Image (cartoon, coloured by chain):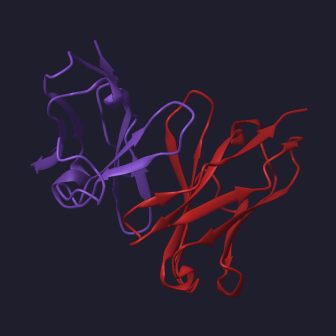
Chain colours: A purple, B red
Amino acid sequence: SIELTQPPSVSVSPGQTAKITCSGDAVSDQFTYWYQQKPGQAPLLVMYKDKERPAGISERFSGSSSGTTATLTISGVLAEDEADYYCQSADTSSIVFGGGSTLTVL
Amino acid sequence: EVQLVESGGVLVQPGGSLRLSCTASGFIFSVYGMTWVRQAPGKGLEWISYISSRGLTIYYADSVKGRFTISRDNAADSLYLQMNTLRDDDTAVYYCARSESERLAGDHWGQGTLVTVSS
């Protein structure tokens, strides 16, 4: 079965660039999706098909994928970006989430 | 505006049963797949089930296979999750989500409903 590995935490100062990685064999042949979840809220899709941004998502969010690692990049980080971020992939009959990464804005 | 509203979450004893509902509005429900995802307290997201737009394709996570049943009523714009033989580790917030494809957990999510399994 698919396994996706994320760093538990990422810290960055306001205005800097945050990179959150997601590693796993599935990343190399399936699309990766990214969700943002703030405390007490439902997840929000912020990136789909590796690098496509849904309507309404800030241009500061971008995605990339190379080999077995997908990366969500947040440029010019704001305090409001502080949240948990989850990557997600799929195989033929299941969906898998990474363990999640907590982004802390220092 | 896409809206998904879950209901049915309550406190239930181990071994008990429960049916969750998710009512959709703001989009043509019958053309989208739907997914249930749960999140145990303080834990990450766990996908548990997917159903295609007409209900012809259904998938389950191993953790719920044989105990949970996903279904939908397109005439009522509603998604359901029948949960049987509940265990303590089924305690979680359960989210329904709209899925453009069976590889995407959800492009729109409800606010979730809390299921607590405890004696």
Q: How many labels does the image show?
A: 0
Residue B50 image position (x, y, % from top left): 53, 67
Give the percent coordinates (x, y) of residue A59: 17, 47
Residue in view at x 31 percent, y 23 percent: A79
- Whether B18 is drawn above or below B101: the answer is above
Q: On screen, B41 above or below B57? A: above
Q: Is B107 displayed left or right of B110 in the figure? A: left
Q: In which quarter of the image is residue A28?
A: bottom left
Quarter of the C terminus of chain A within the rendering: top left
Return the residue found at the far top. A106
Say left or right for B29 vs A81. Answer: right
As rendered, which of B73 and B65 lies closer to the eye? B73
Residue A57 shows in this picture: yes
User: From this viewpoint, is residue B60 visible?
Assistant: no
Image position, residue B62 (x, y; %):
57, 55
The residue located at (43%, 67%) in the rendering is A93
Residue A60, picture quadrant: top left
Left or right, A68 with reference to A24? left
Quick one: A79 or B49, which is closer to the camera? A79
Relative depth, front residue between A89 and B79: B79
The image quadrant of residue B91 is top right
Q: Residue at x 80, y 57 (%)?
A: B84
Indicate the position of residue A61 as horizontal and vertical percent values. 20, 43
